Image (cartoon, helix red, strand yellow):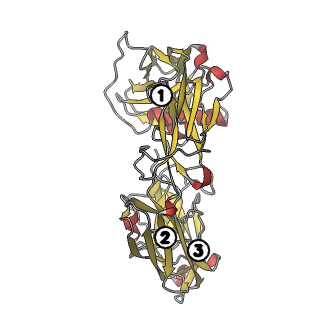
Amino acid sequence: MSVMRARIVAAVSAVCLAGGFVLAAPTFAASAPSSSCVIDPPAAGVPAAVQELRVCVSFDKTAYRSSDTIRLTASVTNLGTATAQDVTLQMPTDDGAFQPTGGYLSLFGYPGGIVQDIPAGATVRNTMPGFATDPALGTVTFDTSVSQDGYVESPSVGASATVTPVFASYGGTAFIDSNYNGVQDPGETGLAGVRITLSGPFNGIAGVGQQHQFTETTDAQGHFRFDDIPAGPYVEGIQSPDGWVVSNPDIHGGYVTVDGSPGQQNVSYPATPPLSDRLHASFTMDQPSYRVGQSAHVTLTLDNVGAQTISGIQASCDNEGFPFDALGVGKGWNVFSGAGVSVAAGQQKVFHLSEVVPSDALLGGNFTVECTFGPSDLGGYPDAQASANVTASLDPTVDFAVRLVDDGDQGVPGGGATPQSPRIMLVDAANGDPITSYQEMVDVADYTGIPVGRYRVVVSNGWQIAPGRSSVVTVTTATSGAQLDVHVVPTFH
């Protein structure tokens, strides 16, 4: 089996079988729209552990327009007497096939190695939205078979429905939203020069292998219009002039669905100045120099110079991933998580924050606090930055390594071997302050110049500390050069 085919098979498993939803075995009446089921008995010569399965697929309608959302439901029921191991549904790649909205990566999640175990008598089921890859053919199909424990021996089962290609128009107005209410009020003028691109995710009427792409630019009044384009879902790109932040509230799930419905010729695109025009941010640090392991105290000042309250302000730090940057997870930073903070019009707010200087900061000789601030649904964020020199700790320091040991049977992939190699971070065992930055895709982390003390190893990206095992390592001069084991188990099964 090719690598690509293996990824596709695993990806389908992730969406059709992920989550382990256990439901009553579904029943499909003979009159159910575009549906079918098949019994998959174990083939001759396969191990006794391979169980009998029932596979069912169905579309929610028998006929669609190309602008409609097509919903496919797939289910697998274990009719055997033991758990069915590593069950996978295969995804067809034929022209005219059903394509989940968002593609494999966004809808199917991690595309490699996720399969599903199904207990005896249980059913896993999932409904996914999508579209026909080539509606010009007049049909949409989904044909699949099931594999179990690496054995692909099932008969295929499929569903089909008719698709009618249709065309529609789409247009609207980009305008300067002076009062930030998302509505073009009297006196709010149009914004010229906004470039809008619609990219169709399906082959459709353009021909097999061809993608629709249409571009229009707003005129002097801010108007634009796409006339008689193939109806269906499109990815929209907005290129704004002079730093304006232009949004389209008509986007749902990352897509604009052109279907000719009322209002689609007059969609409002509010345009606002960059948030940095209204919200100013600045950092100051209490010292020009710090030692590794010392708390750096930082003062953040946010000034709202606009006429409206800005709510939901969150902080995003270390966006470049530099090991000598603050992560924004020390004392005081928690106010910027969740609902965030609000700053009223004309108000100045001051925040006192701290974070332990990590040993990684010795690599560059400085410790930098660099963050952007703003609500998650806006753009043009203001940023703030401050730096200080870093020297070695006055306390004794040691070099050592942390090795992750899998208490399961998979082994810990390292060195970027797969997207599910773990991330490791070292934090102070007493207060949780980070001592090092995240090290991605490693199973063995080497640490240099760490002050002696007790530290907790934090693992993520699909891994956790094994039950009954400790995440704490004690670092002394006696452990210099040693490799300390921390036992973990995967969470992605």
Q: Taking 163 as reference, is 284 above or below it?
A: below
Q: Nearer the viewer, mark 3 or mark 1?
A: 3
Q: Taking 225 as reference, is 466 above or below it?
A: below
| In this picture, residue 358 sits left or right of residue 465 | right
Please name the amino acid that badge 1 sits on.
Val
**For the residues bearing labels 2 and 3, Cβ distance under 8 angstroms:** no
- Percent x, y of residue 175: 50, 45
Element type where label 1 sits in the image? loop
Element type where label 2 sits in the image? strand
Element type where label 3 sits in the image? helix
Q: Is residue 95 visible?
A: yes
Q: Nearer the viewer, mark 1 or mark 2?
A: 2
Q: Which residue is mark 1?
A: 50
Q: Closer to the camera, 32 or 11?
A: 32
Mark 1 vs 2, N-terminal side: 1
| In this picture, residue 446 sits left or right of residue 462 | right
Q: Which residue is mark 3?
A: 360
Q: How many marks?
A: 3
